[in-house]
Amino acid sequence: MGEAKVNYDGASVKEVADERMVHGEGPFWDSENNVLYFVDIAQHRVYRLFQNRLEHVQLDETVSFVIPVAGQQGLFVIGLGTTLAALRWNLNENTFRVVELTVVDADKAGNRWNDAKADASGYLWAGTMGFEDSDGVIPPGRGTLYKLNHTSGCFQSIEPVLPGVSVSNGLAWTKDGSRMFYIDSPTKQIAVFDYNPSKASISNRRVFYDFKTDNLPGVPDGMTIDDQDDLWIANYDGGQVLHVSGSSGKLLGKLKLKAQYISSVTFGGPKLDKLYVTTLSRGVTSEQFNEYPMSGKVLEVTGLGVKGLPNRRVNEKCFKLL
């Protein structure tokens, strides 16, 4: 894609669920079953949208992500507080079961899991953040980006890769697996690493895109990547999704949406040409609702003229007995 700014006049936005989320997050498109999964962190719920039916399971604490396990229908990895857990929730069934796997950040009271993704080999990368108070204040440096090593001990060897982050957030890999993009939201930057797919290791961190460059409001939140290796970044407290070139790091365009707090994005649909967007209603005033009536809704954007890469499942090795 060229470097000229893109307009989205041909795009169409609709709400895909009647319910309004308090803190919608973590959309995952299951290409095998054509199901959209996402969570409401504040309401402790995992949702699925399947054949136009919206269903959820109610959990006992914050749930930050939901990612299917490869080769295991109805089995998911979820971030439950600071517990990494497995959720068994089969399609066309209302019952569910949760199995706790391991706990992180035990020495940091109030921490919780935040964003997570699996790479092309099924390695799970998941990060934490400190406690967010009612004013939205988060203590700096209390989070960590972890990696689940399915080749060496599984849950006993979940590896802290990047300590000292504040709000571990968006993750994305290029098609060839040579680079990994990463967001620590308060930095207002997207970082990029060299990525070794065979070792699932990162090196040579540098700044790829900085919000200061284009004087953008808010912070970067969740992120996805399209089949041209360009980034789509949720602009929390900015009312938009940012489209950034994955080669040059230049801002290609701003997709304005009628939601103030946009939390995450993923491509989905049978052709991976729909952009699903999660948003928040928490903290939105009545005056802001007049300007941003889609706040708290899960949105589907069509007509962008791009396609995404499939969401990756977590490698099944650690989960065969669940």
Image: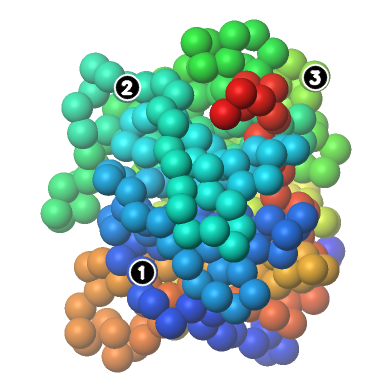
Q: Quadrant of the C terminus?
A: top right
Between discs 2 and 3, the one toward the N terminus? 2
Between discs 1 and 2, the one toward the N terminus? 1
Q: Is disc 1 placed on a helix, strand or loop? A: loop
Compute the Cα span from label 1 to label 2: 27 Å
Q: Residue furthest left?
A: 134
Amino acid bearing label 1:
Met
The reply to whether residue 240 is visible in this rendering is no
Q: Compared to 235, does 310 lie above or below? A: above
Q: Is disc 2 placed on a helix, strand or loop? A: loop
Q: Which residue, given by chain and number where applicable, does mark 1 sit on?
A: 21
Q: Quadrant of the N terminus?
A: bottom right
Q: Compared to 17, does 146 lie above or below? A: above
Amino acid bearing label 3:
Ser
Q: Are marks 3 and 1 in contact (CB under 8 Å)?
A: no
Q: Dot 3, how many residues are within 10 Å of its Cα: few (below 14), some (14-19), or many (20+)? A: few
Q: Is disc 3 placed on a helix, strand or loop? A: loop
Between discs 3 and 1, the one toward the N terminus? 1
Q: Which residue, given by chain and number where applicable, does mark 3 sit on?
A: 198
Report which quarter residue 191 is drawn in. top right
Compute the Cα span from label 3 to label 1: 38 Å
Amino acid bearing label 2:
Asp
Q: Dot 2, how many residues are within 10 Å of its Cα: few (below 14), some (14-19), or many (20+)? A: some
Compute the Cα span from label 2 to label 3: 27 Å
Residue depicted at 14% across the width and 54% down the height: 134
Which numbered circle lies on residue 105? 2
